[in-house]
Image (tube, rainbow, N blue to C red):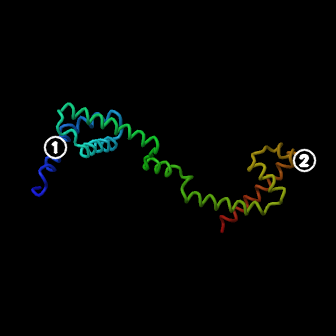
Amino acid sequence: MRWMSSGTVNANTSLADLYDRYAYSIMNYVSRYLSTREDVDDVVLDVFLAALERQVWVSWSAGEQLAWLRRIAYNKVIDYYRRTSRHPSIDLERITSLLVDDEIYTPEYIAVRNEDYTLLRVHISTLSDVQQEIVRLRFGHGLSMKEIAHRLHTTDNVIRVTLSRALNVLRRLYLQEEEK
């Protein structure tokens, strides 16, 4: 360090002394407002970086230095809240666990589900037009047998029998798929 000017060494030494004297106090002050240790550490670092940039505190008394550092800490906390309210962050570990816990969002599950839907469409296409319509109204639209009968201008018994036969055809087709 001999090659540095004595003013630089003294300024760095003074900053180190300032940090040693007030870092714990500033950390306690900031931790009143912020919940995570990482955020507190970041704000405290910002406070002492500001002290490094503006060394007006060098000739002040200890009380003035602490008051000035607290004012900077207060402003940095306000800046933190402004930044996080404009750009909220989400803990990636929390999101990842939510996505993994919810299997319906995994790519594998979606791919299998799409294959199942495709196979169902193929099997339904083998039914007669009337059977397809009844299956669509019953399971796609959630209509009751009476509502379907009313729409198709027939009795609900005819709808029940036709739906039962359609489901039996589908059941047989799926059983044949499993045997392959």
In x, y percent, where is residue 89? Answer: 44, 46
Query: Is there a contact, CB below 8 Å, between mark 2 and mark 1?
Result: no
Picture quadrant where residue 19 is located: top left
Q: Which residue is mark 1?
A: 14
Q: Who is closer to the viewer here, 148 or 27?
A: 27
Residue 142, percent from left and from top: 75, 45
Q: Residue at x 46, y 44 (%)?
A: 88
Name the outermost residue toward the bottom. Answer: 180
Which residue was labeled with disc 2? 153
Q: How many marks?
A: 2
Q: Residues within 10 Å of mark 2 (few under 14, many from 20)?
A: few
For discs 2 and 1, the disc positioned in front in the rendered view: 1
Q: Amino acid at mark 1?
A: Ser
| Residue 40 as seen in the image, left or right of residue 24 | right
Three-letter residue code for mark 2 = His
Neighbor class of circle 1 (other Cα within 10 Å; few <14, some 14-19, many 20+) is some
Residue 171 at x, y = what percent?
A: 72, 58
Q: Measure how far apart labels 2 and 1 are at the Cα level.
A: 94 Å
Q: Nearer the viewer, residue 101 or 11?
A: 11
The vertical placement of 179 against 147, above or below, is below
Q: Residue furthest right?
A: 153
In the picture, measured across the screen, residue 136 lies left or right of residue 20, that is right
Judged left or right of residue 143, residue 47 is: left
- The residue depicted at 30 percent of the width and 37 percent of the height is 72
Image location of residue 115, percent across then percent down:
64, 62
Q: Is residue 92 left or right of residue 155?
A: left
Q: Residue 151: which numbered mark, if any?
A: none
Q: Which image quarter holds the N terminus? A: bottom left
